Image (cartoon, grey):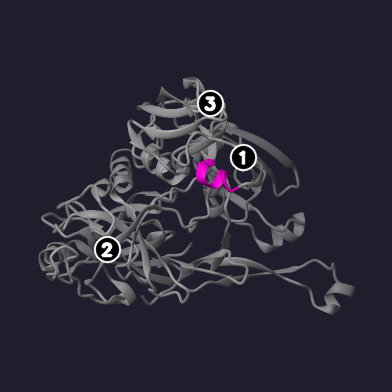
């Protein structure tokens, strides 16, 4: 379980600013600690529920009929079982007292075999040929993904692409004529509108609950990355462990959100659930299907909500010209905002004519665009309204398509460093190159047997560590791996690998 405390701070918006095993099936927010901070709990679990509610129309007093929407959508929501195979890990143990005084005093290392982990969640079929959207945390690190349909047919799924920054993943099962849920427009949702949550809570398959839209563009601080996008639909429809990746639909049976989190003091439903709106889902899914990775557009500013800025002591007498909007504290070099003339101190109040009151709303709007798109930004400068046209860019500062580059381009195989080699070289960690084929490593002159110690100044203890650094590097403007390591002979070496070529 990971725990983090939510604090008020300025968001970094290289827009669109947007756990680990498959056992993680929903995010839970435990609220109100002793000091009144909000504690965010990312909960993992293997066994994963729901309840039904009765509802009446606020206008006519007549019961709202959910049966048509439920019948249309329940067959388009699937049960997902994610399995992470057991892995060998190297752990360090402190030497016993005899070894400490009469041995070399170094920590001892031994290998342990972890058990397989199994987690459960939900997914939504988007097309009749088997494309399914779910939460990234439902299938993260999974070695096998089993999908069970409402008619009990089971398929093995393949991963098409993932986007941790929005907690979304696109997977696919082979076949045709699958039941699916049509995509709706979450922008058209109104507060108080009835919605249904469909999923597999606590492993109870095909469960439907009802509630209303309680809020839109809600940020709850559940994701840890500063690049994550949070602009949730808040609902009081019951969402529990195992609902992650399930559908939030309107009374017409249209998909308007992917259930992702719940707010609770107990870890189970206690009033509010949160879903990723289809304004974000549809863009991410389209990118993953076409490119294998998300083409994320960045506005290129840093800032925060005007409403939050007004709460600061130093701003109590300051007039921003508005009580809503996004205050620009800085613009990033090479970004679209700087090129368009946006300045520190400006207040963004609308994008393409649509009002934005908070950074969260701004993130959601930008997340619907791709690098190269041009948007009209309405801002206040010295309390005077001004329109500028901004060409959005990617994280590398251009408008080119970001390719889904994988570690295969390195042309290398990796293995753990043996205990004997670690003792001989007096190293506590590392990843050994067990083979080199045609690729970046061969071109750089890295030979078989080389032990990678650090990449981009990050210690490398496993292939997963290397993959994490690699994925960050390919998205950076530099696109370079700086590798430090040692050969079994004791000779140290450094390499620089250009990933942009």
Residue position marked by numbered label 1 in the rendering:
317
Q: Residues within 10 Å of mark 3 (few under 14, many from 20)?
A: few
**On the rendered structure, is 10 left or right of 492?**
left
The magenta-colored residue range is 304-311
| Closer mark to the observer between disc 2 and disc 1 | 1
Q: Is residue 143 visible?
A: no
- How far separated are the C-alphas under marks 1 and 3? 15 Å
Dot 2: what SS? Answer: strand
- Of the image marks 1 and 3, the number of the one nearer the N terminus: 1
Expressed as whole percent of the image width and height from the top left, the position of residue 493 reads 71, 39
| Closer mark to the observer between disc 1 and disc 3 | 1
From this view, report whether residue 99 is shown above or below residue 252: below
**Is the residue under label 2 in contact with that under label 3 (CB below 8 Å)?**
no
For the point 47% across and 29% down, the residue is 380
For the point 33% across and 46% down, the residue is 280
Residue position marked by numbered label 2 in the rendering:
212
**Is the residue under label 1 in contact with that under label 2 (CB below 8 Å)?**
no
Dot 1: what SS? Answer: loop
Q: Choose between 149 and 97: the one closer to the eye.
A: 149
From this view, report whether residue 111 is shown above or below residue 454: below
Residue position marked by numbered label 3 in the rendering:
382
- Of the image marks 2 and 1, the number of the one nearer the N terminus: 2
């Amino acid at each position: 379980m990971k725990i983090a405390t939510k604090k008020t701070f300025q968001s970094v918006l290289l827009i669109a600013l947007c756990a680990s095993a498959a056992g993680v099936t929903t995010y839970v927010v435990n609220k109100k600690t002793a000091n009144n901070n909000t504690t965010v709990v990312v909960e993992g679990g293997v066994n994963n529920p729901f309840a039904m509610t009765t509802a009446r129309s606020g206008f006519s007093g007549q019961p709202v009929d959910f049966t048509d929407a439920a019948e249309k959508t329940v067959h388009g929501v699937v049960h997902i079982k994610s399995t992470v195979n057991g892995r060998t890990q190297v752990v360090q143990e402190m030497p016993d007292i005899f070894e400490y005084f009469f041995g070399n005093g170094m920590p001892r290392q031994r290998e342990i075999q972890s058990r397989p982990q199994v987690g459960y969640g939900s997914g939504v079929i988007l097309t009749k040929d088997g494309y399914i959207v779910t939460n990234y945390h439902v299938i993260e690190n999974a070695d096998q993904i089993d999908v069970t349909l409402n008619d009990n047919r089971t398929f093995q799924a393949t991963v098409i692409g993932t986007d941790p920054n929005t907690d979304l993943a696109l997977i696919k099962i082979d076949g045709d004529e699958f039941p699916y849920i049509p995509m709706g427009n979450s922008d058209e949702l109104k507060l108080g509108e009835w919605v249904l949550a469909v999923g597999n809570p606590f492993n109870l398959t095909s469960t439907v609950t009802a509630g209303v839209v309680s809020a839109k563009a809600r940020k709850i601080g559940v994701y840890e990355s500063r690049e994550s996008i949070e602009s949730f639909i808040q609902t009081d429809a019951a969402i529990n462990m195992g609902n992650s990746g399930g559908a939030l639909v309107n009374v017409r049976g249209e998909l308007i959100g992917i259930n992702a989190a719940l707010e609770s003091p107990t870890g189970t439903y206690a009033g509010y659930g949160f879903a990723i709106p289809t304004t974000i889902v549809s863009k991410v899914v389209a990118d993953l299907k076409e490119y294998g990775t998300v083409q994320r557009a960045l506005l290129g500013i840093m800032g925060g909500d005007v409403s939050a800025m007004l709460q600061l002591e130093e701003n109590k007498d300051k007039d921003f010209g508005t009580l809503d909007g996004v205050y620009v504290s800085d613009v990033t070099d090479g970004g679209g905002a700087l090129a368009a003339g946006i300045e520190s101190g400006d207040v963004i109040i609308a994008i393409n004519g649509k009002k934005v009151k908070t950074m969260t709303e701004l993130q959601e709007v930008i997340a619907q665009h791709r690098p190269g798109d041009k948007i009209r930004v309405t801002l206040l400068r010295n309390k005077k309204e001004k329109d500028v046209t901004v060409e959005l860019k990617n994280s590398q500062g251009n408008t080119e398509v970001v390719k889904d580059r994988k570690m295969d381009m390195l042309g290398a195989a990796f293995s753990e460093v043996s205990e004997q080699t670690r003792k001989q070289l007096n190293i506590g960690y590392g990843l050994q190159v067990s083979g080199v084929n045609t690729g970046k490593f061969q071109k750089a002159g890295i030979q078989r047997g080389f032990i990678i110690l650090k990449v981009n100044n990050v210690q490398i203890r496993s292939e997963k560590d290397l993959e994490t650094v690699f994925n960050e590097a390919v998205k950076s403007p530099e696109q370079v791996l700086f590798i430090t390591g040692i050969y079994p002979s004791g000779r140290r070496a450094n390499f620089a690998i250009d990933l942009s070529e």
